[in-house]
Image (cartoon, rainbow, N blue to C red):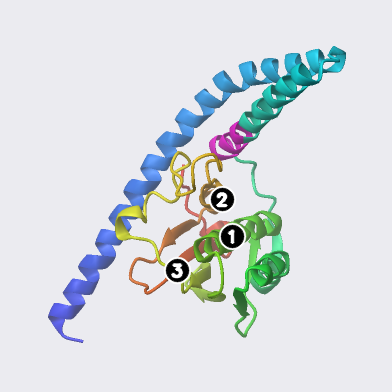
Amino acid sequence: MTSREIDSSSSQSSSDQDERRLRNEKLQSLRRLAYGASHEINNPLANIASRAQALLNGETDPNRRHELATIYAQAMRGHEMIADLMLFARPSQPQLADCRLSEIAQACFHQMNEAARQQQTLLKLETPHPEIRLKADANQLVLALCAIVRNGLEALKQDGQIEISLAQADHMAIVSVQDDGPGIPDEMAELVFDPFHSGREAGRGLGFGLTKCWTIAHAHGGDVYIDTAYGPGARIVLEIPISPSSTSPNE
């Protein structure tokens, strides 16, 4: 590699780090906004749901029962979205314990393989030797990894391949999930973790999976990002410190 190529690679790496830092600062600001908004919206939603349910219990007219049931269902749908925002705003602290990265990946594989099979997508898992051990909340990491795989399945819709691969670099455990789907445009790479952004069709919710993944990664002192150099297809990388001693605060 020439000196010019090294300088170019170093510049690109620095640019990527700056973009990730700006993204994380934005998401931290959104977290504070979400915490305040969640409280303000959740209380009236709870009142609407409880009153609709009370009226429904004493209503005999079929049409009015249908209308009240719709009001209750929509209020509860809003409540579920607020619960997701609250998870983003005030995530539960990870319950750290010794675990194996391969077991976390295998748990995700078993949870998501049936959904992949139903849409005729091949889900693959590559585990390295020697075993990668870390101190983390295994349940939270399974949830985060499943969110990434689910995102890939939604992008592919049918056929294709998703591969989970594990690695270790310095003090970080690294999980990469790559697919051979349409990929993620560069301009969207920093938006997919935004809780107020969704590439879904209208009426299908906020698409909160990758935001949950970001929240869990940062609660562990790690990070998750789009590998914009990968293509065709998409690769999402989850990095988690091997031990709490190697954790750097993200707050």
Residue 120 placement, left or right of 23: right
Q: Between residue 46 and residue 214, name the one nearer to us.
A: 46
Q: Earlier in the sequence, mark 3 or mark 2?
A: 2
Q: At which x and y percent is residue 220?
A: 57, 53
Mark 3 nearby-residue class (10 Å; few <14, some 14–19, many ≥20): many
Q: At which x and y percent is residue 115?
A: 68, 65
Whether the residues at callouts 3 and 2 have beta carbons within 8 Å, the answer is no
Residue 228 placement, left or right of 103: left
Most frequent secondary structure within the magenta stretch: helix
Q: Disc count in the image?
A: 3
Q: Between residue 201 and residue 212, name the one nearer to us.
A: 201
Residue at the disc numbered 2: 209
- The extreme left residue here reads 4
Q: Given the image, on which type of amino acid does mark 1 rest? A: Arg
Residue 13 visible in the shown view: yes
Q: Considering the numbered disc 2 on the image, is that residue within a helix, a strand or a loop?
A: helix
Residue 45 falls in image quadrant: top right
Q: Given the image, on which type of amino acid does mark 3 rest? A: Arg
Q: CA distance from mark 2 to mark 1?
A: 8 Å
Q: Which mark is residue 235?
A: 3
Up/down of 74 relative to 88, above or below? above
Whether 41 is among the magenta residues is: no
Q: Considering the numbered disc 1 on the image, is that residue within a helix, a strand or a loop?
A: helix
Residue at the disc numbered 1: 150
Q: Residue at x 83, y 14 (%)?
A: 59
Mark 1 nearby-residue class (10 Å; few <14, some 14–19, many ≥20): some
Q: CA distance from mark 1 to mark 3?
A: 13 Å
What are the residue bounds of the magenta stretch? 81-90
Whether the residues at callouts 2 and 1 have beta carbons within 8 Å, the answer is yes
Q: At which x and y percent is residue 92?
A: 64, 41
Q: Earlier in the sequence, mark 2 or mark 1?
A: 1
Q: At which x and y percent is residue 247?
A: 52, 56
